[in-house]
Amino acid sequence: EQIEKGGYEHFMLKEIFEQPKSIHDTMRGRLLVDEGVIKMAGIWDHVERFKNANRIIIIACGTSWHAGLIGEYLIEEYARIPVEVEYASEFRYRNPIITDKDVVIAISQSGETADTMAALKLAKEKGAFIYGICNVVDSSIARITDAGSYTHAGPEIGVASTKAFTAQLTILTLIAFKLGKHNGNLGNADFMSLIAELDAIPKKIEEVLNTTHELVQNIAKDFVNATNFLYLGRGYNYPAALEGALKLKEISYIHAEGYPAAEMKHGPIALIDENMPIVIIAPKKGHYDKIVSNVQEIKARKGKVIAVVNKGDQQVSAMADYVIEIPETSECFSPIVASVPLQLLAYYIAVYRGANVDQPRNLAKSVTVE
Ligand code: AGP
């Protein structure tokens, strides 16, 4: 096992550090920047199905569902196809309206999640075209779907999903750009600059790992005894906030909630006092001014702010108690980059609390029962 961990203390840390490679592997052979092409046979062979879809429904659970929410932002922004995102467990039992004009995308690292599988079967019975985004080759979901794209993240052993999540985001980004280019909603110049930027994401993740690892480790020490955490983000980073909170809950057993930052004033603001740590994702591109006022509201109530900002940031950084800098990207890529320090934060808080990071209590790697 020590050899498998490649010198890291836990699989989770190894998997966090593998992300430059797993994202690169997921794009390999698909993203051909020089030719200005995204090659995805699963999409291309059924492109008319996607093009003529009334809507796309994304079904998933847990972390994969968070990836699905970001998929909704991506596909609606770049391909202008309406997207709904559903928890598989809700979808399967609520008699949903599905027709043969719908495309259903299931996202699952393991490809074995019982609720996702059952929801897919239901969608298939009702005539929808079903597409899978799985990490495990030849898994049950990969086999039942009409088509799909594998994430090439490699085996993920840590129960808390990290590299599979960013690989899922990579696939969803490729799908959104490919569909947008095909249906004319994403012009050639924008397409070319977005794919060049996507191609450089593994390098940016590497930079984030190098520049934030030690810093986040030190920040974590200050929060070992925290009992609650709030995670806030807007737009693309709202699901990233949900995912950051889930990571912390799963492995450190600290209660954490993710929220869209603007929803704070509709309830969670009542929780804020000097004992409440608040992780806020505040990149330059993506409602920055609104986030600045959210941080002002938090500081007025003495909340402890851990801010994930872009390099050189001033306004949020001046108010935050802790600042984690990440490189600037177009808004659609920021959840991939911002998720990395949040994974590290959850990891180190859990380690300092003496928790079993790779196999947290009560959790299984794949949930094959209801
Ligand atoms: C992730 O950290 C969790 N352990 C869990 O939420 C997981 O994402 C969920 O069970 C879905 O699993 P899947 O992607 O294998 O379907």
Image (cartoon, rainbow, N blue to C red):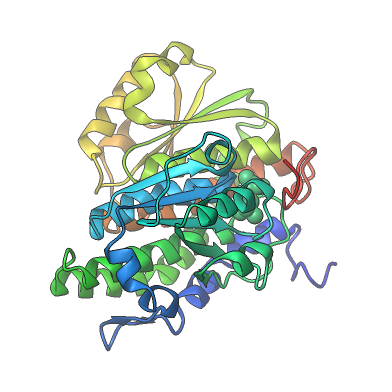
Image position, residue 141 (x, y; %): 62, 62
Along the line of sight, which residue is nearer the eye, 4 or 365? 365
Q: How many labels does the image show?
A: 0
Name the foreground residue: 329 vs 192: 192
Say which residue appears at 24% left-offset and 39% top-offset.
288
Residue 269's place in the image compared with 242, above or below, is above
Is 193 above or below relative to 354? below
Q: In this view, does 297 lie above or below 130?
A: above
- Going by the image, does 190 lie left or right of 103? left
Image x and y of residue 129, in percent? 44, 62
Residue 238: quarter of image:
top left
Q: Can residue 161 be seen in this view?
A: no
Residue 100, position in %: x, y? Answer: 40, 57
Q: Which corner quadrant of the image does residue 305 belong to?
A: top left
**Residue at far bottom of view:** 35
In this rendering, would 359 be left or right of 166? right
Which residue is drawn at the image coordinates 64% and 60% (left, top)? 111
Residue closer to the observer: 294 or 320: 294
Would residue 124 be seen by someone viewing this image from the given angle? yes
Seen in the image, is 64 located left or right of residue 359? Answer: left
Is 253 placed above or below 166 here?
above
The image quadrant where one finds the N terminus is bottom right
Outermost residue toward the right?
1
160 or 38: nearer the viewer: 38
Quadrant of image for the C terminus: top right
